[in-house]
Amino acid sequence: MIPHAWPRLFACAAALAACSGGGGSGPSTPAVNTPPTVSAGVDQSAVEGQNVVLSGSVSDPDETPTVLWTQVSGTAVALQSADTSTATFIAPTVVGSEVLTFRLTANDGTNTAVSDDVSVTVEDDGIRTTEINPPNTSYIDPEIHPLKPEIVFQFNGEGFVQAYDPVTGLFAEGSVRTVFDDVAALSDTKNGPEYGLDDQGIAIYYNKEASDGSLQFFRARESVNGTFTIDQVTPNGSERINQLPSQNADASTTWLVYAREDTAAPFGGGFIAYADANDPSTEIDLTPVRAGFSGFRWVRGTSIFLTTIADGADEGQVLMVNAETGTQTIITNDPGIKFDPFGWFPPEFGGDMAFSATTGAGGDISIYRDTGGPFFELYSVQPPASASLPFAQSAEPFVAQSGTSYISLTLADVTDSIFADATEGDIWVYGIEDGADRFTLRCSDDDPMMVRHEAEMVSGENETFVYYNRIDEVGLFEIFLCETGVAP
């Protein structure tokens, strides 16, 4: 019998399952593929214009399913990152409130797709924005008259002024008047017409080509009969652009600060310079023009302006210049670059001078205060959580008649302060108080992916208005009015 056992033993070694005796296990049970588990998150509320985050979750022990957010109901919105578990959108404009429903779906390719819904209740923010320019017109770089309800702007090579109603903020029909022609393009001059003020009254300063082809500053002064007298301010020769005139009713002259072309200057562009508009031979060069450093702003009601030093040991620090006395003082000594410093006297600071500046990587607004020595940074104002754009531009302080300080600004998708480089921009108003409960207000209309800039705040009779430019699809500069509801 033994010789016959070897073949059986060998066969069992080759196929144990077949030789394990009468207690064999039989065929194996197929593995079960578990469907995904999906949660679209908790219901939430938002205010129109706010950046809303849909934060869902998907789990699957077997594999990685595909995910997709879709909108089930409500005013249609543009969902970003809809193929991930976390999607975002800008809450649409609503009247009163509206519930939007969104669905998160997961599909593992084996089981039936699994979904879960979440609701977002969008509330009216009470802010009203209105396009107020006539059709097919372009109100480029509007500036507010410092003494009466009127703006100056340029369009198609001409400069105009137009009155607005201090109650509604809307333009007064039939009030537009031509001031000058041959104004240079904003792409060349980097600034539109600006109001200057001294003890002789108001004048409008703007760029146009002089007889030698160079860009120079011209002045338009209104006479008692409503006509304007034009004269050239700066002499032919070096090009001068980006003018900002002082607004000081107690001063005997208006001062201009600007960029003067000089290819021999460091960085090859020119210098920040200033001069007496009545005696341009007083021209004084300050700091080289350098991208990101070349902002300058007057302190309203004074003959003082601030700019940023572009090179040397004090690179990035703020220079304060008193144009009347010629005094130049470096007023900061902390690390980092301060872009576009803008000084004012906040009522909240008991008469001390302060300035706001864009700092860090371009996303924050820092507030500095004069305490008798170098100005020091009090705190930094970051974009609110509801903002969808990260970079701050053109932060301009404003004091309402009620005595409260605000900062109007653009939040954009790029750090550069030249609006043409941006593809999207929103208009915001910040309070200057420190802390998480700081006042913030989005003043933009709700059309997505539009370039907005040049915010100008003004006290109306019943509330504070914000005017701003929006560039439409064909390149026209529309002007929008934002009714903030903020006390004038």
Image: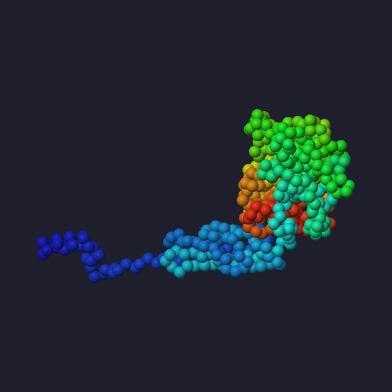
- Foreground residue, 91 or 334? 91
Q: Residue furthest front?
A: 211
Question: Please, is residue 335 above or below residue 146 in the view?
Answer: above
> Is residue 193 rendered to the left or right of residue 187?
right
Question: Please, is residue 319 above or below residue 4 in the view?
Answer: above
Q: Is residue 459 visible?
A: no
Residue drawn at the location 78% of the way across and 50% of the way down: 178
> Is residue 74 rendered to the left or right of residue 8?
right
The N terminus - image quarter: bottom left
Residue drawn at the location 81% of the way across and 48% of the way down: 145
Question: Please, is residue 33 above or below residue 397 in the view?
Answer: below
Residue 187 rendering spot, x and y as whole percentages: 67, 44
Residue 3 rendering spot, x and y as whole percentages: 10, 61
> Is residue 72 rendered to the left or right of residue 183?
left
Residue drawn at the location 87% of the way across and 45% of the way down: 223
Q: Residue furthest right?
A: 224
- Foreground residue, 16 or 98? 98
Residue drawn at the location 70% of the way across and 47% of the way down: 381
